[in-house]
Image: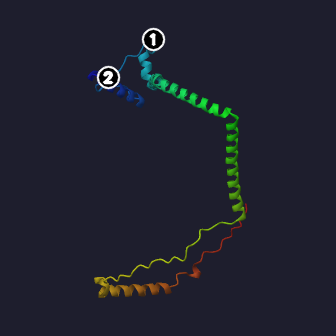
């Protein structure tokens, strides 16, 4: 792609974006204006500028048609090979099911399979209705292993006079707060009559 094509493409994208925002297209920083048509008809270029979304959908449609045709060309041989393999497998299974011995064997197999499913569902329903639930047997009393106690050295501040005084003040304050009565019965709001009819 040449440099000129790239600049045209960038200008086209810029013009498209400007048209979406409702601005007039700009070329090289200058606003491009066209004289109005005198006969009252719009040219094809004016229609494409006025309806750039419609033009974009048309381009998308063309792209999808090309993509579909290319994909069909590449997938067609694979599709044909797969259908041939499927036909050969269906032919083999058809040969097996045509013999009466194999037909009876298939009927017995499917009957036993369905019967096992019904027995399982019935046993499950019977146990839930009966209310018995089996619990896993416990091998014995399990006791947790105790964590060994490792004494640590006390903090430097454990015997500090200021810290001990603060702890004592806090405990005194907690006791005083516990004794204070915060509820005052004479400050209750008046009782309201909620039986209001209109």
Going 32% across and 82% down the picture, which residue do you hit?
A: 152
Instruction: Work out whether 135 lies above or below 100.
Output: below
Query: In the visual, does 149 lie left or right of 197?
Result: left
Q: CA distance from mark 2 to mark 1?
A: 30 Å
Query: In the visual, does 194 lie left or right of 86?
Result: right
Going 28% across and 83% down the picture, which residue do you hit?
A: 156
Name the residue tied to disc 2: 8
Q: Position of residue 186 (x, y in %)?
A: 59, 81
**In the image, which is nearer the foreground, mark 2 or mark 1?**
2
Quadrant location of the N terminus?
top left
Q: Earlier in the sequence, mark 2 or mark 1?
A: 2
Q: Position of residue 68 (x, y in %)?
A: 48, 24
Element under disc 1: loop
Going 43% across and 12% down the picture, which residue do you hit?
A: 38
Name the residue tied to disc 1: 39
Residue ranking furthest to the left: 3
Query: In the visual, does 65 lie left or right of 24?
Result: right
Q: Position of residue 40 (x, y in %)?
A: 46, 14
The one nearer the camera, 150 or 94, is: 94
Instruction: Work out whether 187 lies above or below 16.
Output: below
Element under disc 2: helix
Instruction: Work out whether 145 lies above or below 198.
Output: below
Quarter-wise, where is residue 168 in the image? bottom left
Going 70% across and 58% down the picture, which residue do you hit?
A: 123
Instruction: Work out whether 86 lies above or below 109.
Output: above
Quadrant location of the C terminus?
bottom right
Q: Which mark is residue 30?
A: none
The one nearer the camera, 42 or 62, is: 62
Q: Position of residue 3 (x, y in %)?
A: 26, 23
Quarter-wise, where is residue 146 in the image? bottom left
Q: Residues within 10 Å of mark 2 (few under 14, many from 20)?
A: few
Q: Residues within 10 Å of mark 1 (few under 14, many from 20)?
A: few
């Amino acid at each position: 792609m040449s440099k000129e094509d790239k600049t045209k493409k960038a200008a086209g994208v810029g013009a498209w974006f400007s048209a979406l925002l409702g601005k007039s297209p700009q070329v090289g920083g200058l606003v491009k204006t066209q004289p109005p048509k005198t006969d009252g008809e719009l040219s094809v270029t004016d229609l494409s500028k006025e309806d750039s979304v419609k033009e974009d959908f048309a381009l998308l449609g063309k792209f999808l048609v090309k993509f579909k045709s290319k994909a069909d060309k590449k997938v067609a041989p694979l599709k044909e090979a797969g259908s041939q393999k499927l036909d050969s497998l269906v032919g083999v299974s058809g040969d097996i099911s045509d013999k009466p011995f194999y037909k009876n064997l298939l009927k017995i197999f499917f009957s036993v399979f369905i019967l096992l499913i019904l027995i399982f569902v019935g046993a499950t329903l019977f146990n839930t209705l009966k209310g018995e639930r089996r619990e896993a047997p416990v091998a014995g009393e399990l006791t947790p292993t105790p964590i060994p106690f490792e004494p640590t050295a006390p903090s430097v501040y454990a015997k500090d006079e200021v810290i001990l005084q603060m702890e004592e003040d806090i405990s005194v304050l907690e006791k005083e707060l516990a004794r204070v009565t915060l509820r005052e019965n004479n400050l209750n709001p008046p009782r309201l009559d909620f039986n209001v009819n209109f």
